Amino acid sequence: MKHLLLFGSRSRYTMSGKIFLPVAMLIVMFTIPVIADGQPSQCSPDITSPTVSCIQNIAVGLSPTGEIYVPASLVDNGSFDNCEIDTITLFPNFFTCEHVGMNIVQLSVTDTAGNQNFCNTTIDVQDKLPPKMICKDINVYLDASGKFKADSNAVDNGSFDACGIDSFELDSCSFSCENLNQAVSVVLTATDNNGNSDTCHAWITILDTVAPLAACLDSVCVILDDNGVATATTMMVNDGSSDACGIETMSLSPSAFTCANVGPNAAVLTVIDSSGNSDTCHTTLYVKDTLAPDAVCKDTIVYLDVNGAASVSGVMIDGGSTDNCGIDSLTPSPSTFNCSDTGANTVILTVTDVNGLKDTCSASVTVLDTIDPVAICHDTTIYLDVTGSASLTAAMIDGGSSDNCSQTLTIDSSTFNCNETGANTVVLTSTDPSGNSDTCTATVTVLDTLAPTAICQDVTLYLDTAGKAKTSAGEIDNGSSDNCSYNAAIDTSNYNCADLGRNSVILTATDPSGNSSMDTCTVTVLDTIPPTAICQNDTVQLDANGTGSNTAANINNGSTDICGIDTMYLDNYDYTCAMVGNNQVMLTVVDVSHNVSTCSAIVVVEDTVPPTALCLSPINLYLDINGSASIDQHNVDNGSNDACGIDTT
């Protein structure tokens, strides 16, 4: 049997999830045995598949280029056929770095009759070759934090591996300021993707080219001392300047100051590290004078002028104030005074230096007023009020008194009454708060121009038995008044019967100043005295009719009244036969004021008229059986009559 290894085109196959790229196919050509007469033995027809046997767990190693071809013969473990094998093929049979590890392959055996059979086995593709290592020396530079972390790529100078390098590792990769300016030996280890590794050596030189970070405070105060000088230090300005490997030196410019530099001053801080790298920052140095002046005061006296004003200057109360940079101003407060400030006043002296710093002290400033007021008077007139009094104020007679400050005006007489009407001399005194004074006199005329108030009341007068009555102003006055005093008078005081009834009377009230007023009221004159009734007896004779009458005049016997009798009447005027005899009668006398009085008298009623006798004639008289006959007055009377009646016939 002959074996032939053929190369054909590459094809991609997938088997058990792996990709294989076969690059050759092994074709086994067999020589089929032939019987002597030229006819095959038991091979026609051939329907029996070959018997296939694979060697299990085959290991192969990749070449330095990372590939290997595996022939079918390496896998075949004595496969055979009842006739003759035509071909034995292995798929896949080409392996690279991608196939490192266990790979399932299939051995295919085909006989000459086209019968085919398979077996599977595992090929362990292995990479046992380490990477090829190439190193180079380098310089590295610390970063701003003073550190450097070396990257293997920086040291690697082209190390390679057919299956690829998985990782590089330096035995020393971190460097700091401790390694500054040193060459450090490092080992670079490369491990390929299949765990094979190798090393090479390199030198790393550590350098620092990062400048320090200069950090300044934006502004710093520099305080002048007692002598007016100050020095600024780098520590005052530094706001955390830093360098990863340490600061070598710091300097500040400018750093010395005097009073002339008070205020903002530009300054530069320079920072240098141990490698000579430098950086600067800028700041503003505010030179300040914080020492206040030393204020020293002294007391003084000032005098108010004619305007009532006085002033004091800082120099007047300065007692020797001092300052390290010089005094700019001396300011007293208060600095001006007026009349309300007379006496001791505490004045604060503010001493301000050229830099605005202040100190104060206090001084006693005594303000004096030695100018007298000017008293000026004018005459005036005042009027008594309803109470009979009048008040006078100093202002009423002040004619323009004045003082440089203020004044108090007083008078020796301020109240007046009715006893002081007329001219009165009053003294006006002007006194200022400091006790200075002046006087003048004025004539004050007191007048009463208020008329009395006349109030009268109605009165009733009763005539006396003489028919007269009298009243007075005092009786008519019903509380008239005057602020001072008054006299009351009435226009009529005597009354008689002619004045009976209502009479108007005028009450006049007059005060001592001639002011007067009047009031009118009514005087009612009454007559309450009854008349004097005087009676006399009288006789009335009945007439033929049996009647009679009487009059009051017949009964009146000289009745009288002081103002005259108005009427007289009787309680009975008429009489009849029934009243024959004594009858009491009452006379009533009424005067013109309707006063009444009575008296009684006896009226004798007489019937002096005889009866009228009338007889029948002739008279027939008839005897009775006895032959007698009688007769009486009735038989004869023919209507005899009498006004008062017939008593007997």
Image (cartoon, rainbow, N blue to C red):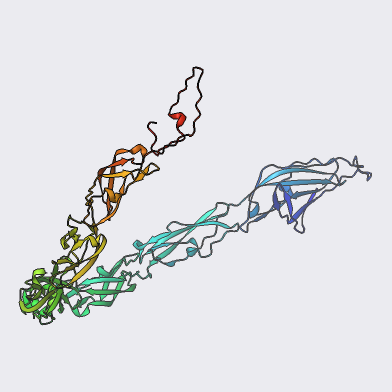
Q: Nearer the viewer, residue 507 or 437?
A: 507
In this view, 21 is above or below 392:
above
In this view, 13 is above or below 287:
above
Residue drawn at x 17%, y 54% as measured from the top left? 465
Q: Nearer the viewer, residue 314 or 223?
A: 314
Quadrant hosting residue 372? bottom left
* View extreme (top): residue: 626
Look at the image and tell me whether residue 145 can be seen.
yes
Quadrant hosting residue 215? bottom left
Percent position (x, y) of residue 339? 12, 75
Percent position (x, y) of residue 627? 49, 19
Look at the image and tell me whether residue 348 can be seen.
no
Instruction: Give left or right: position of 504 versus 424.
Output: right
Q: Nearer the viewer, residue 26 or 214?
A: 214
Quadrant hosting residue 571? top left
- Position of the C terminus, as image quadrant, is top left
Instruction: Give left or right: position of 102 versus 405.
Output: right
Instruction: Give left or right: position of 228 versus 133.
Output: left
In this view, 360 is above or below 555:
below
Percent position (x, y) of residue 438? 5, 78
Instruction: Give left or right: position of 255 versus 545.
Output: left
* View extreme (front): residue: 627
Percent position (x, y) of residue 330? 14, 78
Q: Nearer the viewer, residue 237 or 400?
A: 400
